[in-house]
Every structure is written in structure tokens, then in C-alpha cells.
Amino acid sequence: MAHAPSVLDAKGKDLRETSTELKAMLAKNSVVVKNASHLHGLCGGLKSGEITIEGSTGDYVAVVNSGADIRIAGDAGKYVGDNMTAGTVIVEGNADYGAAQYCYGGTAVIKGNAGDFTATMNKGATIVIGGDVGAEAATYMVGGDVIILGNAGENLGNYLIRGNIYVNGDWASLGHNCAAGDVDADDVRKLETLLKEYGIGADAKGFRKITPVSDKPFYSH
Amino acid sequence: MSTVGAFCVTLHEDKCINSRMPGKCATCVEICPYGVYGLNGDNRVVVQNYNACVGCRLCAEFCPENAIRINPAESELVSRYPWTLGTIEEIHHKALTGGYGLRGFGTMGGPTPHFDGIVVVPSQLASPAPRDKYREECNLEVVIGEDTCEKPIKLQYPFLFPAMSYGALSREAKLSLAIAAAKTGILTNTGEGGVVEEEPYYANGYEKPDRKRKIWEPGGYLVVQWSTGRWGVSADYLNAGDAVEVKIGQGAKPGMGGHLLGDKVTEDIATIRGIPVGSDALSPCRYYDVVGPEDIKKQVEFLRDITNYQKPILMKLGPSRPYEDVKAAALAGVDAISIDGLVGGTGCSPEVVTQGVGIPTIALIGPAARALKDLGLHRKVKLFALGGMRNGLDAYKAMAMGADGVGFGTAAEIAMGCRGCMACHQGNCPYGITSQNPKMRERLDPDEIGQRLANFINASAEELKILTMLSGHSDVTELSEEDLRALDVNTAAITGLKLVGYERPLPWWENGHAK
């Protein structure tokens, strides 16, 4: 097995061609993908492998990731890491609208800022945003952890049912069924490990924690 | 005082206290302000004036032995509309609880135009002669994704079971549908609640399944649904089926997401969906990860990629603007489109939405087929009509109007044993179809009920065959609007079909379009 990663130049190729080539390369080695900003849904449904995408990307990159480790060296388009069940998705730059929605598991780390509707319907994944996050983040979250290093927009955690939202900065407003509190020793340990692992410099004690008031927040019929 | 009795009053003497012990109870006599009841010389209760009854049912409510029944002598739709007992009950429910009405099943009653206003035109001399059902062949097969996928699906009959989730239905009901689908060669659909472990196995036609073995291999006739709640979706899930359906909406509650009330969220269902036990699963009304038609197109592309370009991608639409919606769906690049009508069923929906939101099925099919024709995709992108299909006759009519096939949802539930009590949302289905209660579920044997469903599908397919052949065709794809006539002006007006007797479409219809 070769040590240096294989390089896939996606210039002029469509999703099917790129994906076929990528899967063949991944069977042998880790892969670096270049010139893929025109492709939407790249690296979809992968169960293993290490991929670095250079430059910025299109939408739905790493959709339904089921075990691969995917790093985007630039900025990510809309819905990066959508519906992940396992693996990691790391964005070195910023992420557009709707990053890491519908995730069941795995870890998504966006080192820059993320847009509106980030981490919506999180069902068990760990999602870290290194910068600020837009409005409606972590809407209808039913499990997992969302960690925000910067500030959050309006309606954070709306209809929170289960899981934790940790915020280091401020939020514009909290959504329905959210209660803000302080982090405890377990939280601090968890956050310290995570921040260290992904090379993010922040004081884990400085976070506040948002948890659900009830796990049945809907109107009772 | 009324002179013609609108209600039938029945007093069950074997239950009535007074008939056993005269003089001991006369609650009904005391309570009725209209003198319906009286006491005779022996202190026995008698119904002395049937015609006076106004149907308030107060006597029945207060009778300590439940010995009185009041039934309308004629339809209350006629006698009390718009203040029917259903309406009165609904207002009382809101006044007492502050909550709006929810129920299962689907649209009922009312003036919704349906297939009954349409008749089939048989062949005689002026058209190709009828074909002999007993001695000649007729093709009912439909292939989905023939030119676009590496593994197209060949349906033996142009039918499918529409999406009904695990959660809304019991595990046993889901398996019955999978068994029937494999037996008859039609599609079954996971719905939005994830896949039941054995479902792909049954849908692949294994007769003696090993229930302990976990099967993630594709079956034969299983559609896995990609929906707005994305419950239980993973790469394995998407590859567990033979096709993926992108759900945009449904007939019973278009513009809203799935409703699964907490009473039906058991441990197994909570695990699959990733929610706490007993918590309502109220799916989003739209995809959080779609902000325009371009995004839906991208979703179809990556779903093809994740399933290795092998499997058809379907799309399900609610009844809104059929021409524009079907056009957008076809342009997103799907292989088949299901369009669900107002009459479409549900496990749970707000009553006002089920009853009053959407377009009737018969008014959807024409515009939907026209959208595909205008794109040059009719019969290539398959069109399935859903919503209130009851038999081979409804299927024939939908297909002659331009559909390639139909879905049997509510009819399938009825074939499983449902009696239409409309309380699917409560989770106490006495037949174990829409219940998660183990006591109810054990009443449903998937093998037995799977066979019943298969019988229903086979019989309906035979009906479709009879009608296709008596109208001079040997293939269901040959059916056209010329094979149908509208019985009334309203049906002719909304469908563009020729009106019986008049033998032409109504004047404002020209070349299949309303002027």
C-alpha cells in the first residue's frame, strides 16, 4: 500500500465519474480531491476512507457519511455533512447554510463560521462550530452535542428535545423549550477533550449549557 | 312537535331496570322533555310517541343500564347538515379541551368529486373489438427506470402500496405488506419511519424467513423513503431497498410533515427514529436541507450516487398544483412520480387538514399527465395516482386518464382487516394494524394477512384486466381518455372527459386544456 495519498483531479468531471474514481482510489489509499467546487453531493454515503478536499466545495458534500473521515481544506457550500451517521467531517474554513443537519452520529467540526439552520434535527452527533453560527441553529434537536465557540443567532435550540448545546459566546435569543445553565465538571472534561482533539483553543470552563425543559415540548392534543 | 319521526327509538327490555322491576326506574320518562316515554297502568316504561324524538340522545346518555339506542331514520347529512353530530362533537371537544381534532384514516363524507362520476366505455363495432379475457393475453406489467438505472424494477401489476411508516403501522402490518408485495410483484414502501429489520427480506420473496438474521441486502420490491424527518436514514438504509422515494408531501396533510403521537412511540420505534420513548414525532413540513427546486435536483443526483446508479429514484407529491409540481419533479430527474389526492389516507392528521386541504384525485391526474406529455416524458417517467383507490375499476379510470399505475393505501389497510373506525392515531387498533400495543399486534399474523393482501391485489388486477380487454386493449399502456365518459357536468368540467350523451368535452376544453 502506498503511503502518499492518491490525487483525484475533478476538473471537468461530473459526480458519477468523480465518485467512481474516488471509490476505486479509496479501496487502496487515502485520497486528495482537487478542483471539485462544481460538484454537489461529493463523498456521499461512504463507509470508510480518508479524504481531503482542497479548495472550496459545492453543496451536500459528505452527505449520509457513514464512517469516512473527510476534511475540507477550504470553505464548504450548503448542507455540508448532511445526515451523517458515523465518521468525521472537518471544515477548515466557513460553512454555508444548513451545515450538519439530520446527523445521527459521528463528529462534524467547522472551524470557521456556520450559517442559519446549522445542526438542525441533530439526533446524536457531536457538532463543533469554531466561530459564530446563524439563526435557528440546532432546531428540533433530539440528541447529541452542539458546541458553539462564538456567538449564536436567534431562536437557538428551538424545540430542543434531548441533548446539549454549549455556547462560549452569546446568543441573540433562545427557542422554545430551552433552559440555559452552567457547565458541570463532566461537561468541562468532555469539552476539554474535544477541543484538544481538534486543536481549538478555548477555555472549556467559559461555556454555558442549554438543555431541554421537557422531552415532550409539543402541544398536547 | 314533529309529525314524521326523524329518529328510531329502541328500548332494550332485557337491559331495562323498569321492565324487570316496574316503578323502580323511570329516568327516561323524567328526562325527556318531548314526552317520548311514558308509564302505563302497571308503572312500566313504554315508548308512547316515537315521532316526538328530536335525537338529542339525552335519554341514552342518562339510562343507567345503557338500554336505549337512538338511530337516525334518515341520513343526518340530510336532516341536520351543516350541524351534523360529528360537527357538534368536534365543537364540544374544542370547547372542553382547547385542542383541535386529530384523526386517522382520511377524508370522509362530503361532496368530494371522485371516480364514481366516471364510467368506462366498452368496445363494440366502431372501435377495435373487445378482447377475450378468458382466452387472450393482456399485459399489465410496468417497468420503472428502464433507461436510467442499472436495476430497473419490473412490476407484475401497475400497483403499489404507498408509504406508510413503521410507527404509524405495526411491525406485523409492515411485514404483511412486504410479503404481499413479493407475492404479487408490486412495490411496498418503508414510509418515513426507517426500515423494519426483516422487511427487505420479506420483500425479496423469502417464504420461510429466518427472523433472527439481519438482512441488509436489497430485496425485490422495497422502496425506502427519504423524507423530511429523515428518521432512521443511513447509507445502509438507502441501499436496503430497490428504489428510493423522495417525499415532498402527501394527500391527507399536504404542507405538513408526518404525525406520530407519543402513545405509539415504543422503545423500538424510538431507537430507530432517535427520539425519546413516548415523545411525539412531528416531522418537519419541508426539508430543512432544501431551499429551492435546484436543491431537490441535487438531492436526486446524490441519492443516485449513494445507490451506485442502480436503483430508480421516485418522488411523492401532495395534491397542490399538479401541472407545475409534476413538471418540477420530472425536471429534478426522477424515474417515477406519485401524486396523492385529497382523499389520501393517514395515520394521524389534523381533521381540518385531512378534510379540507388539497385537490381531489380525479382532478390531479389529467394535469399531471399533461405536464409529462409537454416534457416528452409521458410513459417514460412513470406516473402513479394515489388517494382513494378502491378496486380495479378506479385503477382503470386513473390509468385511462394518464397514470401508469395506482397505489392502494387505505384499501390495503381494509384488506388487512380495518373496519374504518378512524382512530388510527390513538394506537388502539383492534386489528393490530395501526397499533404498537403487543396485545393488539399479536392478533395480526403477517403470513395470513400477507396472503389476504395478495388476494386483494390479484383480484383487483383481474378487474383491471377485464376492463382493459372489454375496451379493446391488450396492454394497460394503451388506455386513454377516449375509454372514459363523465356522468355529470361537474366531473366533465374538472376532468375534460367527454360528457355522456353530449359525447364531447365541455365547450371550454380544447385539445386537452381548459380554455
Image: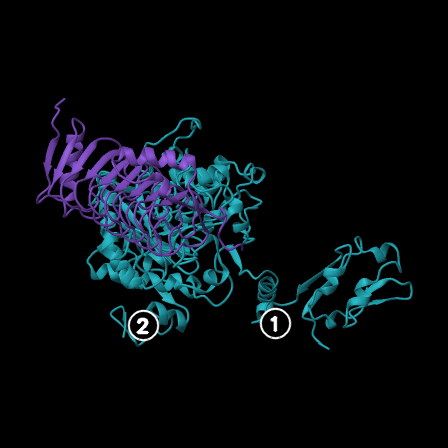
Asked whether the beta carbons under mark 1 and mark 2 sit within 8 Å of each other, the answer is no
Q: Position of residue B482 (x, y in %)?
A: 30, 64
Q: The purple chain is which one?
A: A
Q: Is residue B168 visible?
A: yes
In depth, the one of A120 and B442 nearer the eye is A120
Q: Is residue B378 visible?
A: no
Identify the image quadrant of residue B394: bottom left
Residue pictured at 24% horizontal, 41% vertical: A62
Residue B504, numbered label: 2
Q: Mark 2 lies on which chain?
A: B
Sequence-first tag of 1 and 2: 1
Q: Which chain is cyan?
A: B
* Tag 2 secondary structure: loop
User: Which amino acid type is shown beneath numbered disc 1?
Assistant: Ser
Q: Distance between the residues labelled 1 and 2?
A: 37 Å
Residue B79, numbered label: 1
